[in-house]
Image (cartoon, rainbow, N blue to C red):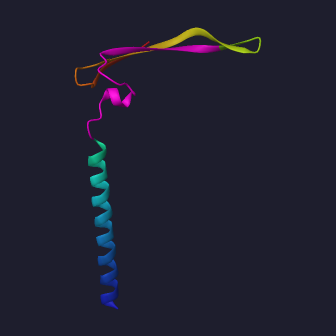
């Protein structure tokens, strides 16, 4: 009986170790060269961009752009890393 318990514990420890190693390798491969440009869906070298948001207005059955609700400015360094975000 002791051998059976030890064997099942040993087997589950091996499985846990393999799963842990698999997750570790996956997390290292996922962090390849990910920068701010890629995260924001930008292609090419971008120094900065502005994004404006507007409120939608419903007028006579149509939806039109209303007043400006806010803006976001993102600034990147030469490697594409986001270095500053301004929201107003």
Query: In the image shown, does 47 or 83 lie closer to the viewer?
Result: 47
Residue 25 percent location from the top left of the image: 27, 53
Residue 74 percent location from the top left of the image: 35, 18
Residue at the extreme bottom of the image, as rendered: 1
Query: In the image shown, does 14 or 35 lie closer to the viewer?
Result: 35
Magenta residue span: 32-56
Residue at the extreme right of the image, as rendered: 60
Instruction: Identify the image quadrant of residue 6.
Output: bottom left
Residue at the extreme left of the image, as rendered: 78
- Left or right of 84? Residue 54 is right
Residue 36 percent location from the top left of the image: 32, 27
Image point (33%, 26%), residue name: 37
Query: In the image shown, does 30 or 8 lie closer to the viewer?
Result: 30
Q: Quadrant of the N terminus?
A: bottom left
Q: In this picture, is 2 found above or below 10?
A: below
Residue 45 located within the stretch drawn in magenta: yes
Residue 79 located within the stretch drawn in magenta: no
Residue 41 percent location from the top left of the image: 40, 28
């Amino acid at each position: 009986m002791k051998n059976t318990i030890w064997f099942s514990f040993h087997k589950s420890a091996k499985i846990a170790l393999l799963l842990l190693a698999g997750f570790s390798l996956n997390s290292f491969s996922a962090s390849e060269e990910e920068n701010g440009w890629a995260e924001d869906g930008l292609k090419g070298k971008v120094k900065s961009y502005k994004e404006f948001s507007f409120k939608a207005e419903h007028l006579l059955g149509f939806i039109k752009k209303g007043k400006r609700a806010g803006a976001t400015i993102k600034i990147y360094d030469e490697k594409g890393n986001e270095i500053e975000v301004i929201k107003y």
